[in-house]
């Protein structure tokens, strides 16, 4: 865990709200110091993250506030302050949160000083907040996605009060810059380029819990990346629910209105940044200029995550994905042709209303034609409030399971074939960690996102090194330094 707290120098900060929150951190410091005196030890804090890279990035901001306030970070939930940063994209994500929260109440019984907070996407659903108010009364603080920037302020209120504090906003149009961040890795970082989603795919809850699309100004993004690079970061991942509609929300004529392709170029020019990733593009907005920029710029990772969701045209139409099976295949094959060494991964949902075996066979056909390097496969989960939840032709669980298993087998076979193609090549990897199973090994990540394990000393962590790919083990390689 990197202990670099970015942007905590007041003279660097442009955003008044961020300065205000730093003031609240100072206030919280006094309260945490008093608690430390009372406990006779440093108070501890644990941030539990569910869901996507956006949540992971948000959690780095929550943790920075807690650390600056004086908490010591711990990995387990028997801490003095526990915060759950939740996801609600599928029902199993919700259930995991409730399960963990239930267990956490046992810790609170043994620790009268303990505070439990819950935030993130699930909290933007009114039903979830009601459920917590009713059945999880031991929770001290609830807030949502739109006001996460005021966590320092809410932390103060929470430390002052014995009552449950709830602060949820329905929406926001503001972006707060320069909040303190505590990065998990010293050498790589996520960077938000936009927030929210305007696509309204009919199965998806995200537009309702993350709000309308809001792009950050390119100047702010580049400024953040310059600071990260100065702090030793070599790889950035540009984050957004729909990155290639970056800037669509800026007015025509606004000097900030640049395309995603242009932004990629600007980011690649930042000195010290050696690798640039992005997550997630939407196939409908994947324009040729983005393909050209990637093809012409070796700093941009040879990995494109291109969510397919389904391969049947009627299902795609009812999902409101705005592309056809044929358009998706053309795009993927064009990307493969123009960027020959690229890995294409995807997301697939099985069991959307009206999707039977014949429709799933269309998805399987796309998998075979595109030869995805990997795919995240999900069983459709009905989300209250989304249009698809009201569709009448919901598919029985057994049929979904059967189709899911059939599709998963094709995904796995294809991914294995694709991975084995690199055998014998020499690749540059960014060394990320010591291998969890064998301490003599390091784990590095290739530009195309494949992991390689190889012998090496841990002072190589954070370095780019050349490794030969000796043996393919399904989805990863055993290699050796060259
Ligand atoms: N059910 C199942 N999967 C979903 N996703 C989004 N909403 C749902 C849902 N209701 C998947 C999509 C998306 C990924 C992040 O989660 O595949 O790309
Ligand atoms: Fe959800 Fe579709 Fe937006 Fe992705 S693009 S977050 S699937 S609504």
Image: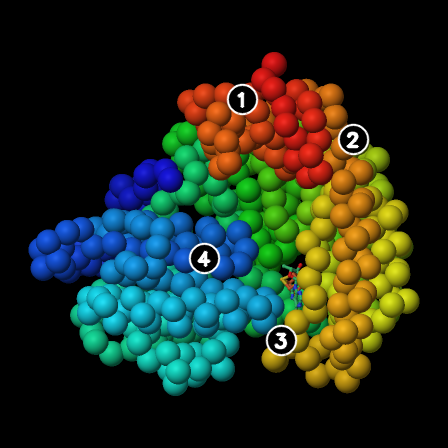
Asked which secondary structure carries label 2, the reply is loop
Judge depth for marks 1 and 3 and give the one in front.
1
Question: Which quadrant of the rendered structure holds the C terminus?
Answer: top right
Quote the CA–CA distance across marks 2 and 1.
Answer: 22 Å
User: Residue 455 has which mark?
Assistant: 1
Q: Earlier in the sequence, mark 3 or mark 4?
A: 4
Of badges 2 and 1, nearer the viewer stands: 1
Quadrant of the snapshot with the N terminus: top left
Mark 2 or mark 3, whichever is nearer to me: 2
Question: Of circles 4 and 1, which is in front?
Answer: 1
Q: Nearer the viewer, residue 125 or 18?
A: 125
Q: Secondary structure at mark 4?
A: strand
Residue visible at 66% across and 31% down in the picture: 477
Asked if residue 24 lies left or right of residue 333, the reply is left
Could you say which is closer to the camera, residue 423 or residue 339?
A: 423
Residue at the image position 61 percent from the left and 80 percent from the top = 385
Residue topped by disc 2: 421
Residue 26 visible, this orientation: no
If you read the primary sequence from the N terminus, does the residue marked by circle 4 or circle 1 appear first?
A: 4
Q: Residue at x 85, y 53 (%)?
A: 366
Number of callouts: 4
Per the model, the C-alpha gap separating discs 4 and 1 is: 31 Å
Residue designated by label 3: 383
């Amino acid at each position: 865990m990197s202990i670099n707290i970015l942007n905590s120098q007041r003279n660097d900060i442009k955003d008044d709200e961020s300065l205000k929150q730093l003031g609240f951190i100072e206030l919280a410091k006094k309260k945490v110091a008093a608690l430390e005196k009372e406990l006779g030890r440093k108070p501890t804090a644990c941030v539990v993250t569910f869901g996507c890279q956006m949540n992971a990035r948000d959690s780095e901001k929550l943790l920075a506030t807690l650390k600056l306030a004086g908490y010591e970070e711990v990995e387990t939930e028997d801490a003095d302050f526990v915060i759950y940063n939740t996801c609600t994209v599928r029902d199993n994500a919700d259930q995991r949160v409730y399960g963990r929260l239930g267990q956490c109440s046992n810790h609170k019984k043994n620790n009268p000083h303990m505070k439990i907070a819950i935030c993130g996407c699930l909290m933007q659903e009114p039903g979830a907040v009601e459920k917590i108010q009713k059945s999880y009364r031991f929770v001290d603080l609830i807030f949502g996605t739109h006001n996460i920037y005021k966590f320092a302020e809410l932390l103060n209120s929470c430390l002052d009060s014995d009552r449950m504090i709830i602060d949820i906003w329905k929406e926001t149009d503001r972006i707060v810059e320069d909040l303190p961040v505590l990065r998990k890795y010293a050498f790589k970082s996520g960077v938000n380029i936009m927030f929210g989603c305007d696509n309204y795919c009919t199965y998806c809850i995200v537009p309702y819990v993350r709000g309308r699309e809001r792009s950050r100004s390119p100047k702010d993004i580049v400024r953040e990346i310059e600071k990260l690079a100065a702090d030793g970061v070599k790889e950035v991942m540009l984050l957004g629910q729909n990155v290639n509609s970056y800037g669509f929300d800026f007015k025509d004529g606004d000097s900030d209105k640049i395309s995603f392709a242009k932004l990629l170029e600007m980011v690649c020019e930042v000195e010290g940044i050696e690798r640039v990733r992005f997550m997630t593009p939407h196939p409908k907005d994947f324009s040729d200029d983005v393909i050209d920029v990637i093809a012409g710029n070796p700093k941009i990772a040879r990995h494109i995550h291109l969510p397919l969701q389904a391969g049947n045209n009627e299902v795609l139409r009812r999902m409101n994905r705005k592309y056809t099976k044929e358009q998706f295949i053309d795009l993927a094959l064009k990307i493969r042709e123009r960027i020959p060494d690229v890995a294409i991964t995807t997301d697939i949902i099985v069991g959307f209303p009206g999707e039977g075996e014949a429709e799933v066979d269309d998805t399987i056909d796309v998998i075979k034609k595109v030869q995805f390097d990997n795919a995240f496969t999900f069983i459709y989960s009905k989300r209250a409030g989304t249009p698809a939840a009201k569709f009448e032709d919901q598919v029985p669980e057994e049929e979904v399971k059967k189709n899911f298993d059939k599709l998963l087998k094709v995904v796995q076979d294809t991914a294995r074939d694709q991975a084995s193609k690199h055998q014998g090549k020499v690749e540059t990897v960014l060394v990320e960690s010591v291998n969890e199973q064998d301490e003599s090994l390091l784990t590095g990540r290739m530009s195309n996102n494949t992991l390689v394990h190889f012998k090496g000393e841990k002072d190589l962590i954070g370095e780019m090194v050349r490794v030969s790919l000796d043996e393919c083990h399904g989805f990863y390689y055993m290699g050796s330094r060259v």
